[in-house]
Image (cartoon, rainbow, N blue to C red):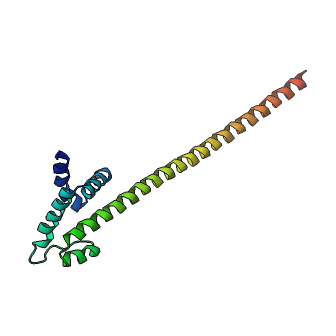
Amino acid sequence: MDNCKEIQSRIESFEHGNLSLKDEEAFTNHILNCADCREEMEIYYIILYGLDDDNEKSIENSSYSEYLDAFDFTGLVEQKLKDSEARCLFLRQWSHFTRVRYLFVTAVVYRVRYDKRRRKLHRYARHAKKVQEMYRREEKLKA
């Protein structure tokens, strides 16, 4: 029950998009599996939008307006939870893609730097061989 109180206290943060990805996933999973918390979320939306006589408050996503116009707060909660699940999945996949891209770029940069060093060392080695050959020629000429 303590977990339910904590989840219910996060409904407003969820509505305003102030939860971290991890918290939003935990919140969404709990609300989907807990009838009491889902009912509490419906009550939150009834108070927020249903009791607004002047229709001063509007919801930013027009796909939710059909639920508000029909006073279907159960449908609104379900749609918001579905959208949250989809957004979390997208962000997880994007995060994974970003990590893979970072690793790839790091590998390419490392390889480029390695190749530059290798070429530089190769130039030094060629130069050292030329210097050695010069000294040998000078010694042969002296002898």
Which residue is depicted at the point 15% across and 71% down?
49
At which x and y percent is residue 116?
Answer: 64, 43
Q: In this orientation, which residue lies closer to the viewer: 68 or 139?
A: 68
Which residue is depicted at the point 76% across and 36% down?
126
At which x and y percent is residue 36?
Answer: 17, 57
Which image quadrant is residue 11 in?
A: bottom left
Is residue 121 toward the left or the right of residue 140 in the image?
left
At which x and y percent is residue 118?
Answer: 67, 39
Which residue is depicted at the point 70% across and 35% down?
124
Which residue is depicted at the point 79% across and 29% down?
132
Location of residue 92 with respect to 43 vertically, above or below: above
Which image quadrant is residue 115 in?
A: top right
Is residue 131 toward the left or the right of residue 117 in the image?
right
At which x and y percent is residue 24?
Answer: 28, 54
Is residue 111 toward the left or the right of residue 29 in the image?
right
Residue 57 in view: yes
Location of residue 61 with respect to 13 vertically, above or below: below
Total marks shown come to 0
Q: In this orientation, which residue lies closer to the viewer: 111 or 28?
A: 28
Location of residue 89 with respect to 120 vertically, above or below: below
Q: Quadrant of the C terminus?
A: top right
Looking at this view, name the residue that lies furthest to the top.
143
Q: In this orientation, which residue lies closer to the viewer: 135 or 6?
A: 6
Residue 18 in view: no
Q: In this orientation, which residue lies closer to the viewer: 83 or 40?
A: 40
Is residue 133 toward the left or the right of residue 84 in the image?
right
